[in-house]
Image (cartoon, rainbow, N blue to C red):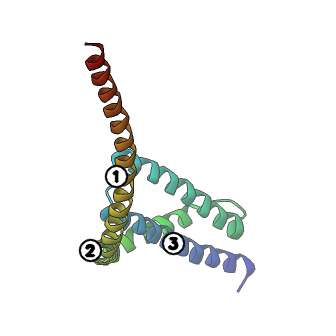
Amino acid sequence: MSLQISEESMLILMSIYGGLVLVLCYDAIRILRRIFYVGFVRIIIEDVIFWTVAVIFMFNIYLKYNYGRPRFFSIILTVGTMFAFEWFIGRKIINVVAVKMNKILRKIVKPLKKVVKLIKLKIGKRKSIKRGRKNGIKESKKSNKAVKQRTETANSK
């Protein structure tokens, strides 16, 4: 096989590889979006960051395997791989994985919520005790002033 044909075949394989990596990463982002609430602005920011990293990733592939020149067929292969994976596999898997991850997170978070509630309760008791001491001291000073005023008014009569 000639050198040029082997380079072209390697570019084809790397274009398919790049498409798979990109679609798997984007599916991971989509799964996280289904598990955690994401606002519209955050979606835009995440997409801009993802596609910027995707462009840099694909450019590195083109740089290594085609001297930095993106070829029309390699771009079509990358996008086609992404589309085919999403069409045949991605749609079905995303919902299943998101539901299972959500169940797992609930099982993990449920005991943690109890621990956090316990810690907050302990901290709250400490704060209320400290506040009570401070308030008790302040109130006793106020009551001492009131007693002094009463005795002064009684003595002056």
Q: Position of residue 99 (x, y in %)?
A: 26, 74
The answer to whether 1 is drawn above or below residue 38 in the figure is below
Residue 128 is tagged as 1
Residue at image location 71% in from the left, 68% down from the top: 64
* Residue 119 quadrant: bottom left
Residue type of the residue flagged with mark 3: Val
- What SS does tag 1 mark? helix
Mark 2 Cα shell of 10 Å, populated few (<14), some (14-19), many (≥20): some
Mark 1 Cα shell of 10 Å, populated few (<14), some (14-19), many (≥20): few
* Residue 69 quadrant: bottom right
111 left or right, relative to 63: left
Residue at image location 50% in from the left, 57% down from the top: 50
Residue at image location 70% in from the left, 86% down from the top: 1
- Name the residue beneath numbered marker 2: 99
- Name the residue beneath numbered marker 3: 21
Q: Position of residue 127 (x, y in %)?
A: 38, 53
